[in-house]
Image (spheres, helix red, strand yellow):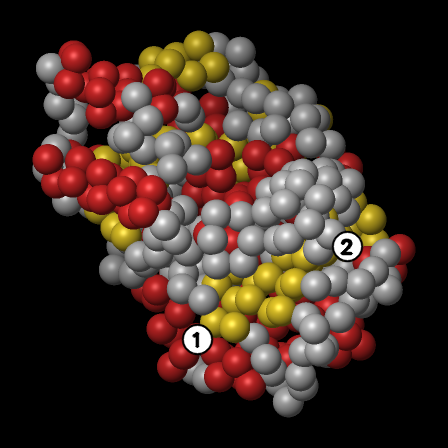
Amino acid sequence: MGMTISEKILAHAAGVDKASAGDILWVKVDKAMMDDILGPRVEIAEKLKELNAGVWDKDKVVVISDHYTPPANAKQAEIVKFTREWAKEYGVDNYYEFVGPCHQIMVENGHALPGKVVLGTDSHTCMYGAMGAFATGIGSTEMLGVLVTGEIWLKVPETIRVVWEGHLQKGVMAKDVVLKTIGKIGHAGATYKAVENVGSTIENMIMDERMAISNMAVEMGAKAGIIPTDEKTKEYLAQRGITEGYEIYESDEDAEYCETLYFKAEELEPVVACPHEVDNVTEIKNVEGTEIHQAYIGSCTGGRYNDLLEASKVLKERKIAKGVRLLVSPASKEVWDRCAKDGILQILSEAGATILAASCGACLGLHSGALAPGEVCISSTNRNFLGRMGSKDSKVYLASPVSVAAAAIEGKIVDPRKYL
């Protein structure tokens, strides 16, 4: 029996020839990422002192302050300051702040590469599977062990193979694809499994779109969300000056999958995840007319260049509805600068959008756009749990950037295709 991509990566990292689902392996970690919200301030700093230990390899540790930047109050500022000073104390040069959500920064700076094992103290670390890495989120206690030893034990996950074939309709994005997949599998249907996304639909997607797919694998409970490395992956890396230093793995033809699901892209219409679960997915036409107060385009899921570009096509020479707030937070400073240079931010601003800093803030209700009781938001982010973006009496619908833009124009959820 052959091996899946996940099994091959973990086998290599453990120094063994063969790995099968269910095996427990000690694997060497290629990159360890911590953010400010679950980083060194949470147990790690104190325990390292108690152990009188340092960081196993400073070049393999990345620390990113993103959830609390820009800080909204003194407590958040204190946390960012602590994170910054900890990185300096331990000689971690790969420290970033005020430049955007950690996952986008990891990819932009070449910290997530094909064939590597990448761990992070954030559940959406699985996004790096779009680069062909085995990437997953871990807790702070587990990260403490990784920082000291550079290793961790992992159970090799079973793999669900998700096959999307065909071309997407105009106005349908990767966000619709992954929401449809989550709706089918369920919020716990892939618990401690890898989801391997394949098929012509995925192959035709640009990297911005692929990252949205892998980013939300955890919303099915998945350990990892893998997309095979291909020419588009290599071209993306080459544009960033990376042409070597990574391994490409492909699943064998006789690899064993615990389940295989098939979808036809042509049949997919714009969808939304309704409050308060990400798997509460329905076609947008079924909730059309739902009034909104806020529309949000941003985050490590829906704030990349292509997301803002497509949203700008909907909003160009149009205005958002009276009484509606449209907030836009590019996924990184690099994305912010590129969108500004290309006039995309100007289009969005002229439509009535408020352009925010690149940050995690509004996605989880920390700052820059929290919801009040009774308010409804449609968002291109990754979670709509009760109270996720502010008050527990608010509601969040998840949708693609073009669906969010269309809703902002009318002040209610609508099918975006009529604007394209």
Numbered circle sitting on residue 339: 1
Q: Residue at x 36, y 73 (%)?
A: 337
- Please give left or right for residue 227 compared with residue 101 in the image: right
Q: Regarding mark 2 in the picture, which secondary structure is present there?
A: strand
Q: Residue at x 53, y 11 (%)?
A: 22
Q: Position of residue 50 (x, y in %)?
A: 17, 13
Q: Are marks 1 and 2 in contact (CB under 8 Å)?
A: no
Q: Regarding mark 1 in the picture, which secondary structure is present there?
A: helix
Instruction: State the CA–CA distance, disc 1 to disc 2.
Output: 26 Å
- Please give left or right for residue 400 compared with residue 127 in the image: right
Q: Position of residue 362 (x, y in %)?
A: 52, 54
Residue 41's place in the image compared with 180, above or below, is: above
Q: Residue at x 34, y 45 (%)?
A: 76
Q: Residues within 10 Å of mark 2 (few under 14, many from 20)?
A: many
Q: Residue at x 86, y 64 (%)?
A: 289
Residue 416's place in the image compared with 220, above or below, is: below
Give the camera-side residue of 265 and 125: 125
Farthest bottom residue? Answer: 317
Mark 1: amino acid: Cys
